[in-house]
Amino acid sequence: MSTPKEPKNKIRRNEKREMRGRMGNFLMFLPNMAKLLGRLLKDARVPTAEKALFVGAIIYFISPIDLIPDMFPFIGQVDDIYVIALVLLRLVNRTDERIVRQHWSGGGDIVSLADSIASIAPMLLPKRVTRILSSKVELAPAGQMLRNITDRNGPIVREIPLVEEEAAIDSRSPIAS
């Protein structure tokens, strides 16, 4: 006898519900993650470029103007925690993860927590928002950037297109960034 199979979309719906539950638990760590960024700003071992990203992530977290405004419950906070997780993972990839762990005051391991958030959040966010937050970008050359700022006629950053071999890697993976 064969057992009736559940439709694929039913399984996906259950998986998505489980992801929302996990992300809801992760959102409880959001204030501690913002404090962590503040503590890392004061640490001399953290490179200046990373500190600039921390400032940007903190401003994004505090600012009422987001890609998804915080007035939308749950999903409005998911993009905030995703940005912070990406910034933390970038620091871990560029320095010693012990620095991040030393300043963490929340429960659990912050590196695995950030990695889990970075893998789940893109599945809950709209694809356009995920692409904006996880794209690789580069700054325009200094002279062109100044002209574009003063004339307001061109970009100061541009998205770097994926090479074919990078396209095979899921762009939502923290390893891809």
Image (cartoon, grey):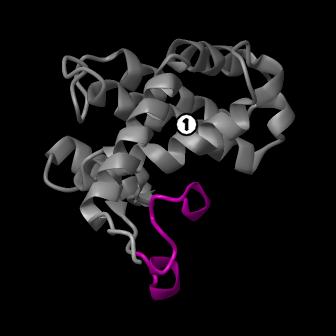
Which residue is drawn at the image coordinates 21% and 25% (left, top)?
69
Which residue is drawn at the image coordinates 23% and 54% (left, top)?
128
In reply to whether residue 27 is colored magenta, the answer given is no
Percent position (x, y) of residue 105?
73, 12
Q: Residue flagged by tag 1: what amino acid is it? A: Ala
User: Is residue 93 visible from the viewing direction of this image?
Assistant: yes
Percent position (x, y) of residue 166?
51, 78
Left or right: where 34 falls relative to 106: left
- In this view, the residue in front, 77 or 25, is 25
Q: Which residue is mark 1?
A: 85
In reply to whether residue 172 is colored magenta, the answer given is yes
Relative to 118, does residue 40 appear above or below in the rendering? above
Q: Which residues are magenta?
A: 162-177
Quadrant of res 107: top right
- In this view, the residue in front, 39 or 45, is 39
Q: How many marks?
A: 1
User: Is residue 144 visible from the viewing direction of this image?
Assistant: no
Percent position (x, y) of residue 31?
52, 12
Percent position (x, y) of residue 76?
27, 26
Which residue is drawn at the image coordinates 39% and 29% (left, top)?
80
Which residue is drawn at the image coordinates 75% and 30% (left, top)?
109
Left or right: where 149 falls relative to 24: left
Relative to 120, does residue 50 appear above or below in the rendering? above
Quadrant of res 38: top right
Left or right: where 157 falls relative to 86: left
Relative to 165, does residue 170 appear above or below in the rendering? above
- In this view, the residue in front, 165 or 114, is 114
